[in-house]
Image: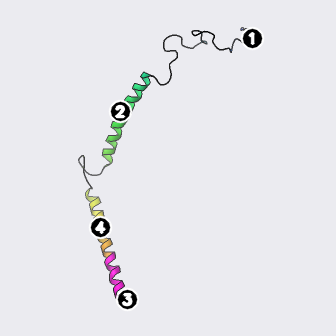
């Protein structure tokens, strides 16, 4: 099918500063980039909300109650049991080495 444009002009670049292809915006803001003030403010707002949400989630993940709570009772009991088991193992091992050496 023959084109209505003369040969070579349908794909040619625009000649003047205001001459654009069909469907392109013309006028103020036509040459806007991706990084502009509107997107910067939007990104800043999203970042602020994300920081608040992540801080809240991190506080929920910490065991115990209060803002700066230490270890909870289960963790203290586990540490005590591990220490007691280590002491008993060490005592049993040291008792066995003295008796077999003589």
Residue that appears at 50% across and 19% down:
32
Of label 1 and label 2, which has the lower sequence position? 1
User: Nearer the viewer's eye, disc 3 or disc 2?
Assistant: 3
Up-down relation of residue 101 to residue 29 (above or below): below
Magenta region, residue range: 89-99
Which circle marks residue 81 in the picture? 4
Residue 48: give its label.
Answer: 2
Q: Nearer the viewer, residue 19 or 78?
A: 19
Name the N-terminal-most of marks 3 and 4. 4
Answer left or right for 22 relative to 64: right
Q: What residue sits 29% from the left and 51% below the top?
A: 63
Which numbered disc flags the more N-terminal residue, 2 or 4? Answer: 2
Q: CA distance from mark 1 to mark 4?
A: 88 Å
From the image, tell me which residue sits under label 1.
7
Q: Do callouts 3 and 2 mark residues in contact (Cβ within 8 Å)?
A: no
Residue in view at x 27 percent, y 66 percent: 80
Characterize the local packing of mark 1: few (<14), some (14-19) or many (20 or more) Cα atoms within 10 angstroms.
few
- The quarter holding residue 16 reads top right
In the rendered image, the vertical position of residue 64 relative to residue 57, given as above or below: below
Up the image or down, 95 lies above or below 61; here it is below
Q: Between marks 3 and 4, how big is the CA–CA gap?
A: 31 Å
Q: Is 16 one of the magenta-colored residues?
A: no
Image position of 13 (left or right of 55): right
Q: Report the mark closest to the observer, 2 or 4.
A: 2
What element does badge 2 sit on? helix
**CA separation in Å, label 2 and label 4:** 44 Å
Give the crowd class for mark 4: few <14, some 14-19, many >=20 residues within 10 Å: few
How far apart are the two marked residues, 1 and 3, measured between alpha carbons?
Answer: 105 Å
- Judged from the image, the secondary structure of the residue bearing numbered disc 3 is helix
Disc ID at residue 101:
3
Position of residue 25 relative to residue 47, above or below, is: above
Residue in the picture at 75% in, 11% down? 7
């Amino acid at each position: 099918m023959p084109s209505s444009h003369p040969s070579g002009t349908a794909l040619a670049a625009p000649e003047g500063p205001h001459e654009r292809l069909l469907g392109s915006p013309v006028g103020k803001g036509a040459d806007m980039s991706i990084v502009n003030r509107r997107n910067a403010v939007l990104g800043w707002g999203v970042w602020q909300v994300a920081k608040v949400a992540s801080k809240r989630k991190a506080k929920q993940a910490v065991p115990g109650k209060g803002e700066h709570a230490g270890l909870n009772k289960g963790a203290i009991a586990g540490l005590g049991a591990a220490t007691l088991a280590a002491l008993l193992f060490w005592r049993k091992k040291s008792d066995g080495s003295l008796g077999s050496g003589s």
